[in-house]
Image (cartoon, helix red, strand yellow):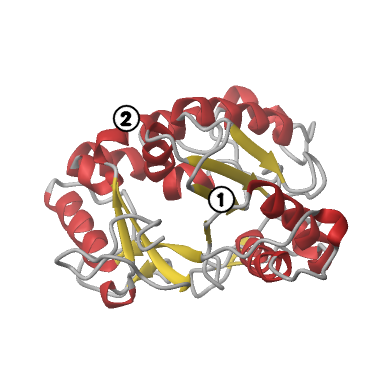
Amino acid sequence: MTFDQRLLLVHAHPDDESIGQGATMAKYAAEGRGVTLVTCTGGEMGEILVPELTHLAADQEDRLGEHRRGELAAAMAELGVTDHRYLGGFGTYRDSGMKWHEDGHAVPADDIHENAFWYADLTAAADHLVEVIREVRPQVLVTYDQFGGYGHPDHIQAHRVATYAAALAAVPSYRKDLGAAWDIVKVYWGAMSESRMRSALRALREAGDTTAFEGMDPDGPLPPFVTADEDLSAVVDAQEHVDKKLAAMRAHATQITTDGPFFALSNNVGNVAWGLEFFRLAKGERGELNEDGLETDLFAGL
């Protein structure tokens, strides 16, 4: 099938896409726009929240990646996304794992597998994505910011690979064997609105929930994955697709618990919390803006 408008998303692990842009993906897929997801690792090092599946953990049977492959397929079915791939093919890059720094952000773990994505050769990894870019020919790319939202090494590496691959894919003389050159017109970084996050936290606290997003003060400092509203470029309103997003998140059962902060936020604040997804423009020109000075369509101006 040929699509006039095509969106490419590059994420680190299964579940990142549903949390970050699940509603946007569902909206665009329902509207007949092309949506392609590239996931960089199998999520082998993820924490397992389903007790009966803990035997799949990396320090036991080490089969979590294969299980999460099924979770991702189920999530994509919920969102209506039919084109989802692993960078270089499933198993090419392994989840690098992480640990928490005393300052509250993620950093690389002490022991990292030799095949970890964090150790990937940047050009080799980018070439896998160049081939996808030249095949799909997306006008819009979505990935993480340079800090990967909260410092996870695989998120940072996904940002680096996506950024480098987008540049290489546009060079006519570069790796002609990977397809004809293609220049992605607009690149966005996923973001979370500071004002929306504060409003959501305030609503949760007023409802008596002190455990969801523990340690975050509605009126205090917020983590680095929260973006000042003045730095936001676009918002996609996909509130009519929130049910699909939440269903996709539930499909990632080993990673997201239905009584955790994600669903507490949804239950207490409503569809607005999960149906509005924000972005920062990293490349390209902004199109038509709404009254808040934001694009409402990632393809605006194209």
* Rendered view: 74 above or below 119: above
Choose the circle earlier in sequence order: 2 or 1: 1
| Placement of 7 over or under 50, stated as above or below | below
Q: Position of residue 192 (x, y in %)?
A: 35, 61
Comparing labels 2 and 1, the label whose residue is closer to the camera: 1
77 left or right of 258 in image: right
The mark tally for this picture is 2
Residue where numbered disc 1 is placed: 8
**Disc 1 secondary structure class:** strand
Q: Alpha-carbon neighbours of circle 2 within 10 Å: few (<14), some, or many (≥20)?
A: some
Q: Amino acid at mark 2?
A: Asp
The disc placed on residue 243 is: 2
Is 32 left, or right, of 11 in this rendering?
A: left
Residue drawn at (57%, 36%), measured in percent from left and top? 2
Q: Secondary structure at mark 2?
A: helix
- The foreground one among 158 and 175 is 175
Left/right of residue 105 with respect to residue 264 in the rendered view: right
Residue 68 falls left or right of residue 22:
right
Q: Residue 98: which quarter of the image?
A: bottom right
